[in-house]
Amino acid sequence: RPLDKTMPRLVVRPHFIMDRDDRKRNKNIGKNFMCRLQCMFSHSSSSESRLTLEDTQQWSQSLERLLDSKYGLAAFRNFLKSEYSDENIEFWLTCEDYKKIKSSFRMASKAKKIYEQFVKAESPKEINIDYHTREQIKRSVKSPTVHCFDDAQKIVYGLMERDSYPRFLRSDVYRTLLENLSADATKG
């Protein structure tokens, strides 16, 4: 039978070559990601100016530890963005900033923005919360307090802790980052 030139050719490669290529690609992904993280914070003069194996290993101890690390938070946010599921971390961080507001005028304005962006049904970055919580926030935003998003924030944190965070820990990016930092540590 004549070869059909319109059909793409299937190239069969030995399995061990694909494994080696995948490892090389993952190693490069991890190194590139590590470089991007360090470049993001290169202007920093704090004690956490370099990403270390120990810091990165501590991310796996709890979501709280991950979010307390500037590199951990950046890595987690980038991971969620790559999965098109960053609305939860964005909501959680926005609420953390909201709690720092002292002016009642600014608080009312920010509460309305948070509601419109994250809480309102069909909003651009709608978070996954129950109807009761959504309605409670809708009422409390009319005369907002520092705590008007607390229930939703707890729900979202729980979702991240049970779903996004374990996926992050299993991700190629995180595992490769650990491998690269481990290899760098043994090189001295």
Image: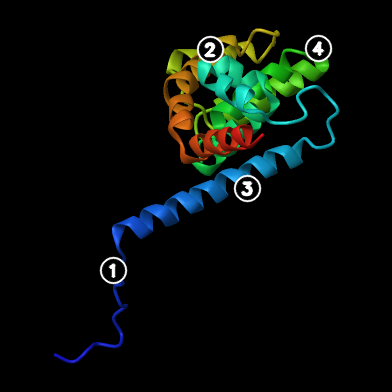
Which comes sooner in the sequence, label 4 or label 1? 1
How many residues crowd around disc 4 within 10 Å: few (fewer than 14), some, or many (20 or more)?
few
Look at mark 1 in the image and give the residue it sits on: 12
Say few, some or many: other residues with alpha carbon within 10 Å of mark 2 (under 14 / 14 to 19 / 20 or more).
Answer: few
- Tag 3 near tag 1, CB within 8 Å: no
Q: Nearer the viewer, mark 4 or mark 3?
A: 3
Q: Amino acid at mark 1?
A: Val
The residue under the point 77% across, 35% down is: 41
User: Mark 2 = which residue?
Assistant: 154
Identified by mark 3, the residue type is Asn
Residue at figure coordinates x 68%, y 38% from the top left: 37
User: In whole angstroms, how far apart are the C-alphas of marks 4 and 2?
Assistant: 23 Å
Furthest-bottom residue in view?
2
Q: Position of residue 28 (x, y in %)?
A: 56, 50
- Is residue 129 shown to the viewer in this render? no
Residue at the far left: name it: 1
Mark 4 lies on residue: 104
Quadrant in the picture for the C terminus? top right
Amino acid type for the residue under numbered disc 4:
Ser
Answer with the quarter of the image where residue 101 lies.
top right
Find disc 3 in the rendering and name its residue.
32
The local secondary structure at tag 1 comes to loop
Name the residue at 49% across, 52% down.
24
Mark nearer the viewer, 1 or 2? 1
Report how far apart the C-alphas of labels 1 and 2 lie in the structure. 50 Å
